[in-house]
Amino acid sequence: MEARTHPLKWILAVLIVALPTSARAQQPLTGVDGCAILASVVYTEVTEARLGYYSGPSGDPFFSGQNETTLCDETAHSVTRAFTAALRQANIDVTWGFHVGYSGDYCPGHVLSQCFPTGDPAMPPLSERDRSFVMRSWEAVYDSVSGQMSLYPGSNVSRFQGSELGRSIRRLITASNAISVASDGRHLPGEEQ
């Protein structure tokens, strides 16, 4: 009789251990994990916009839980660092300001509305096309991300779904590219439609 209850005890023990894990899976990703997902979305969309290639909604395996709500409590840092990294892939160097001990790879503040990329003064000046792409893509990223941020002043917290945020950034960059091409009749590198 005791041999029969022993396996039952193991099954119950496994179920008890599994229950808290499944409950945790329902909670939004927060902190570093959520910020890594935010950075991945921004990096992917800006890089693909510059290359003129979109992999679609499931193109980035990093944020495979695309329909889950995600939180990032370091939004300005995560977004600006990812934006800088994406532009570097296209040989465009930007900075977010210089002061002692600061490299310029990300915005030093925590208020996203006060973050503006500029050409890196230590590098050759940006061409008109590169400057235009930086301006248009930053506006798309800022508009998309700021719409997902908490509403109180100085908030650095964003709550989003990766696939939805990616579509928003892509849509705004694509729309701004179409306006740019229509206004001057030329295609920018990586913007062929």
Image (tube, rainbow, N blue to C red):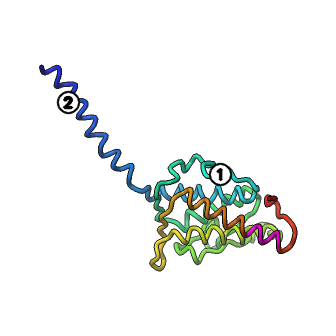
**Foreground: 44 or 193?**
193
Please give the residue where the numbered disc 2 appears in the rendered image: 9
Badge 2 amino acid: Lys
Q: Classify mark 2: helix, strand or loop.
A: helix
**Foreground: 9 or 97?**
9
Q: Compared with residue 30, is residue 157 higher up or lower down, i.e. above or below?
A: below
Is 178 included in the stretch rendered in magenta? yes
Q: Quadrant of the C terminus?
A: bottom right
The quarter of the picture where residue 115 lies is bottom right
In this orientation, does residue 180 appear? yes
Badge 1 amino acid: Gly
User: Magenta segment, which residues?
Assistant: 176-182
Q: Position of residue 94 (x, y in %)?
A: 71, 67
14 left or right, relative to 120:
left
Q: Residues within 10 Å of mark 2 (few under 14, many from 20)?
A: few
Marks 2 and 1, how far apart at CA: 47 Å
Task: Tell me the number on the disc at residue 56.
Answer: 1
Q: Quadrant of the N terminus?
A: top left
5 left or right, relative to 176:
left
Q: Residue at x 34, y 45 (%)?
A: 21
Q: Position of residue 159 (x, y in %)?
A: 47, 64
Classified by dominant secondary structure, the portion drawn in magenta counts as: helix
The quarter of the picture where residue 92 lies is bottom right
